[in-house]
Image: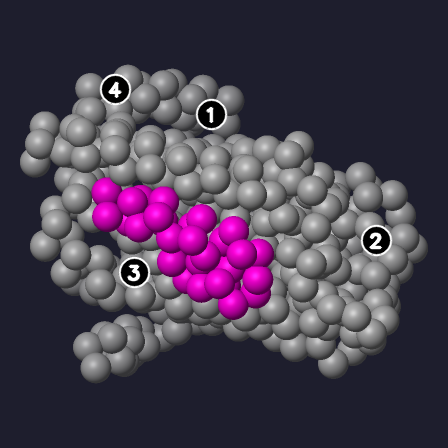
Amino acid sequence: MPVVRDLRLLLRFRDFRRLLTVRLLSQLADGVFQVALATYVVFSPEKQTSPTAIASAVAVLLLPYSLLGPFTGVLLDRWRRRQVLLHCNLLRAALCLGTAGLVLLRVPDWLFYLSALSVTGVNRFVLAGLSAALPRVVDGERLVMANALSPTAGTLAATAGGGATFLVHLVVAEGPASDALVVGLAAVVYLCAGLAALALGRDLLGPDPSRVQPRVGEALLSTFRGLVHGLGHLRRRPPAARALAAMTAMRFCYGGLTVTVLMLCRYAWSGSGGADHATADGLALLGLAVAVSGAGFFTAAVITPWATGRFGTFGWITVCASSAAVLLPVLGLTFEPGPVIAAAFVLGLATQGAKIATDTVVQSSIDDAYRGRIFSLYDVLFNVSFVGAAAVCALVLPPDGRSAGLLLVLSAVYAAVALGIAAHQRRFT
């Protein structure tokens, strides 16, 4: 297989292997911590979970990426990146242990969220540092290959971490002790990631001292101005702007269904037989829904190259949005596990398929000098829309997750995206 052959070529680079080890351990711990946070908020037997609590957890997981993302590079261009990977992972290990202690103490939710937010906020520096360091450990000829394989491997590691967390919760009695145990497990893996960074040379990952940015304040101000200029450039590129608007709306819909499925798993599908048994049932169904949605993402990656060749880039976005608009009410309004989990597959495929197409539109229609800034804005829109969906669900979703009105509204948003893209498709092709 080409992927296996490419990976074997990259693994010949000693420092690439070491950097990849840091990535895999870091993102494995991310998966453990994120699922541990979700299960603590949603499935703790002693908690009466609400859509508001889920919205808070989603904000903790995603907002640091959006708010810190455009500015992390400024600091990464001033600090030794090896030291960033070392100290940030060690810091996250310590913060995870503190969070585990808060779980055992059953502190107020706001204090728990503040601690969890500190863990996820540091994460942005680690991921950006891993990406910035990659050109220092492979040659230019294989950089594209490394950029394709490294994040994919990290995503698989995060998925494995999340799966391991689900398994732990299914075999260990529910309660604060088990929640703290899983968060503590994330701390151990973060510690291993930090120690793995020591295998890399202190100055290997850069930046070169001669190319360090000016004062931090000046660099931050320059970054802000650059984002404003990037937004102005985007306004002059209607194809990219419309694709980003469509992707933002579709991500919002995906977020709405995610919160709906969480509430259904917690209450409507948990069954009977005691709190622990009900929690195990709900966790098992949530794990299945996540796996099926991930299968939809994978399927989109496989078929999108063919689909964009068949329908065109904007045509494929239209197909994705219209398919979701039709199938979401057909499958979702039953509020039964089988059809709703099937809907998770459809929406995973549609969302990822549209995202791949949107990435292509942005890369092809935005000038190279502005591309980085536009992708920073893209990252903000992508995550804020998901958080916004969680906030809307907090206002309108009933405790058991059964809201026909919400699903119909989300279906209407998908339909509006499909109609809007189709109406302007000829202008873009």
Q: Residues within 10 Å of mark 3 (few under 14, many from 20)?
A: many
Dividing the picture into quadrants, the one containing residue 228 is top left
Identify the element where label 1 is drawn: helix
Tell me the kind of residue under disc 3: Ala
Per the rendering, the mark at residue 300 is: 3
Do callouts 4 and 3 mark residues in contact (Cβ within 8 Å)? no
Residue 147 placement (x, y as % from top left): 30, 59
145 is within the stretch colored magenta? no
Residue 356 placement (x, y as % from top left): 27, 50
Per the rendering, the mark at residue 47 is: 2
- Is 203 or 250 nearer to us in this picture? 250
339 is within the stretch colored magenta? yes
Dividing the picture into quadrants, the one containing residue 377 is top left
Do callouts 3 and 1 mark residues in contact (Cβ within 8 Å)? no
Identify the element where label 4 is drawn: helix
Q: Is residue 68 visible?
A: no
Tell me the kind of residue under disc 1: Leu
Of label 4 and label 3, which has the lower sequence position?
Answer: 4
Which callout, 1 or 2, points to the residue nearer the camera? 2
Of label 1 and label 4, which has the lower sequence position?
Answer: 1
Q: Quadrant of the N terminus?
A: bottom left
Identify the element where label 2 is drawn: loop
Residue 129 placement (x, y as % from top left): 45, 51
Q: Is residue 72 above or below residue 167?
A: above
Real-space Cα distance between discs 4 and 3? 29 Å
Real-space Cα distance between discs 2 and 4? 46 Å
- Please state the extent of the stretch shown in magenta in the rendering: 318-347
